[in-house]
Image: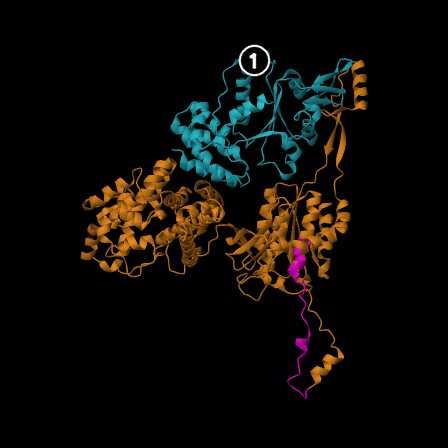
Amino acid sequence: MQQLADIEESLTLFTEGIAGRYLHIKASEEFVSHLGLKLDLLGAGQTQDTIYLPNELDAPSSGAYRFLVMEQIGQRECGTFRFRFDQALDKVEVLKNLYSPPKDLTPRTGDYYLLFNCFSHPSLASELFFLLEKARVIGHLLRHYPGLKRHIDHFFDHIAVVTGPSEDPLENAKSYLQGHAHDSQWNLIYEAIDDLKQAKKSVYDSAYYLCELYELVAAFYVVNDTQLFDDQEEQLGDWLNREQRLEEWEEDMEKVESALFSFDQFEGDEIEAELSENAGGSVREEDLDIKSLEEGRDQLKRRIDMERSSVQHAMGPDQSVSRSFRYDEWDYLNRTYLRHWCRVFEEPLVPKDEEEIDDLNQVIRDYRPLVQKQLEQIRPTGLQRVKRVQDGDELDLNAIIEARQDLRAGQSPDERFYSRKERMHRDVCAVFLVDLSASTDDPIEKSEPKPLTKEEQERIDNLRDPWDAITADELITEEPKRKIIDVQREAMVVMASALDALGDNYGIYGFSGYGKDCVELFVAKEPDDKFTNTTLRSIASMSPKRSTRMGPAIRHGITKLTQSGQAMKILIILSDGFPQDCDYGPERGNHDYGVEDTAKALEEAERKGIESFCITVDRSGHDYLKRMCPNGRYMIIEEMNDLPDQLTKLYTQLTNR
Amino acid sequence: MDSLTQGEQPYYLPLKDEINVFESAYEAKLPVLLKGPTGCGKTRFVEHMTWKLYQNKTEAPDVSLVTVSCHEDLTATDMVGRYLLKGDETVWNDGPLTRAVRTGAICYLDEIVEARKDTTVLIHSLTDHRRILPIDKTGELVPAHEEFLLVISYNPGYQSVLKDLKPSTRQRFVSLEFDYPSVELETTIIAHEAQIEESSAERLAVIGERVRNLKQHGFEEGVSTRLLIYAGQLMARGIEPRRAAEAAIISAVSDDSTIQQAVADIVDVILP
């Protein structure tokens, strides 16, 4: 038995290698569709950014999973989702006779919807068509990936769902495709399958065979059981096709934009001069062109927007910019790890505009003298001359004299008579995890209402004229209060500029999320990135999001640190309260589960040689922090404004051991 | 004449116009910087060009190509020369760079950013109009031979931020960018170098292309053309293709077991 969880990590890499772009690998249980779209019988399928696979397969090796992945990628490589109905009409003669435009035809109507509606039972047509496509895809895979053959054979022999002998044409076609016994009365279908497996067949060849074979197949069901294909369901294939079409529209959009741009460029010089000669004062043709182009662009833009939101509604939000990872979670009630329980999405923060980082730059300037003083304690002292080495840039005089003495005395001398300069390096990688839960939007302190002036008091008390009376609340002018997130951002910026000067590697991530399947990790800076204005702008765009599921965020931080390869690894968590999430433990109000899981994650960090530390602003945090952090490695910041200062001190201590 | 210029022409399949650019740079005495990932053919290109440029020369140096593979502990002394103990004397011994400067060879500093910073500054006076090499230990100023050319290579991909080439150094060179060839060209290269059939070579090239899609994941370089040729050479000597790929590609690209597994899976579906 093969479990997806066991091989998910390497399978994700495999998929990225073959497909040439990142695709999430998820279990079929994670598939959600608002339109009731379905994966195939086994639970495999794909959306714009994800390949879904069954949680387990009864197979001796992971080859079966590879085949399922390849089948999905194969559909893309074979252009199954680049089917355009107008081209099909050109290429498949018979289709013209079958097609009459539906009443609800719009430019956004799906191409596969149009194709299947040419037939009396669209669902039957769809089933037949995708079966033929499957044959074409398998033919393609066998030609280009010969190593898959044994996995395909094994899959069809042992895993694929096979029904017993029947007269059903579709079942027989499946059996034929899989190399099992089949009823010879459907030879025409088998011939089509064999033909489609050949090289240089396109999706329109499948459409051709659909037209050819449909009547034959439908006749069987008319006699037997038409009910089976009566209800018309939304098809995942149609939506994937629409999603692909969206990309083509976007390309069209770019073309229109660039055409308009070139009009703009030329206007005023050549074209105008040329036109005034030719047009002789009438309305310029170019102006008309520009107008129609602009109208076309606006129309296309509206269509793209509407189509994109429909596609996202059907197949879920597009997460192609993020990468996802699964992590275990510690269930303290049952004293066991829940295997691959949480999914962490790692996505880049969208940097803010240049102007908005002025404040942060000011913060850096304010703190620089203080921070520099502290860091000087741990900065390595440049170059040091190492003596008595085998190879170097200068001779070591003392060693030379000794060597000479030895030679004179007839002994073999020590060969290490050089000296060289060596630079002292710090070998540190730090990861900062910043809590971006909704509560970081709270002000640092609730401001006390200012005492009212005498006049104001009189006005409030002036009850003789109720129209003039105002309330105390209205009088207090609201100043924008500093929020926890503001100070967190400032602390991170101070830290970043300090560490950059020190030369340590460090990464800065914000974390939040909602629910176990959507823990979000926002990347402001990876350890290998340079500290630039973009880093500052990314930190500036850190904003309060949703919950605080700390465990998976810490585990992802551990992965990052382990991958860095640095000798000293530091993990610092900045938060404003206890870990909590909607499904972090059986009871929502009880935080023990979250605390225990976080404690376990920190324990895992310690086992991997990572120094961890929690900094929180929650003044009532002692009770749970004591349980959560190993060896009292936590700090409660009383005065929030001290955070940047305290953080630098802490970092100095942690790395100066 | 040395073995390089006397032997056969080293095989090199041009990807773009790099041969013309290099020849012109040599004529104009402009130093050349080769940028590109490991194992994509930089060193072979330099060998090929040296053969081309020196084979018909009447007064060619004994060694026409001096290659220095730079590493973290390589100092300026290692390149320029040092005093050695010989018997009772300390005698000056030219380093490879000085030798090339004196004799008029091509000096190729491979992976220059790996070396210490003092080495990169050392080449500054050699790479502008002065063309001299100062040796501070002997107080000598060695003017470069007419035929001398400095070629350095550098791999912007995997070196860390700290090891970036300084702009003042980078801007002294004519820069040639290299990358892994397309599947078609790589097929030709592998087939020629490993002496295997086109079809097998193509499979290896496809493996290369797909594995390179993973290059951000811990192994910075992807699989090099060199490794693919190694796999081909093993296959040409009768090693079963999967075993050859395992030995030459899978184990070589990364030590991370997950990545190894993913690369093994890619090889598994592509090789028959």
Rendered view: B26 above or below A549: above
Amino acid on which disc 1 is placed: Lys
Position of A414 compared to A204: left or right?
Answer: right
Report helix, strand or loop for mark 1. Answer: loop
| Image quadrant in which you'd find residue A456 | bottom right
Instruction: Pick out the residue farthest to the top.
Output: B58
Rendered view: A623 above or below B54: below
The colour with which the image depicts chain A is: orange
Q: Where's residue A307, x and y in %?
A: 41, 57
The reply to whether residue A111 is in sight is yes
Q: Residues within 10 Å of mark 1 (few under 14, many from 20)?
A: few
Q: Where's residue A461, x and y in %?
A: 70, 84
Residue nearer the viewer, A352 or A587: A352
Residue nearer the viewer, A388 or B176: B176
Rendered view: A394 above or below A65: above
Chain at tag 1: B
| A489 is within the stretch colored magenta | yes
The reply to whether residue A43 is in sight is no
Instruction: Pick out the residue farthest to the bottom.
Output: A464
Q: Where's residue A49, x and y in %?
A: 45, 50
Residue holding disc 1: B57
| Image quadrant in which you'd find residue A35 | bottom left
Quadrant that contains the C terminus of chain A? top right
The colour with which the image depicts chain B is: cyan
Magenta segment boundaries in residue numbering: A463-492
Q: Where's residue A65, x and y in %?
A: 41, 45
| Image quadrant in which you'd find residue A113 | bottom left
Residue nearer the viewer, A599 or B214: B214
Residue nearer the viewer, A339 or B117: B117
| A86 is within the stretch colored magenta | no
> How many numbered marks are there?
1
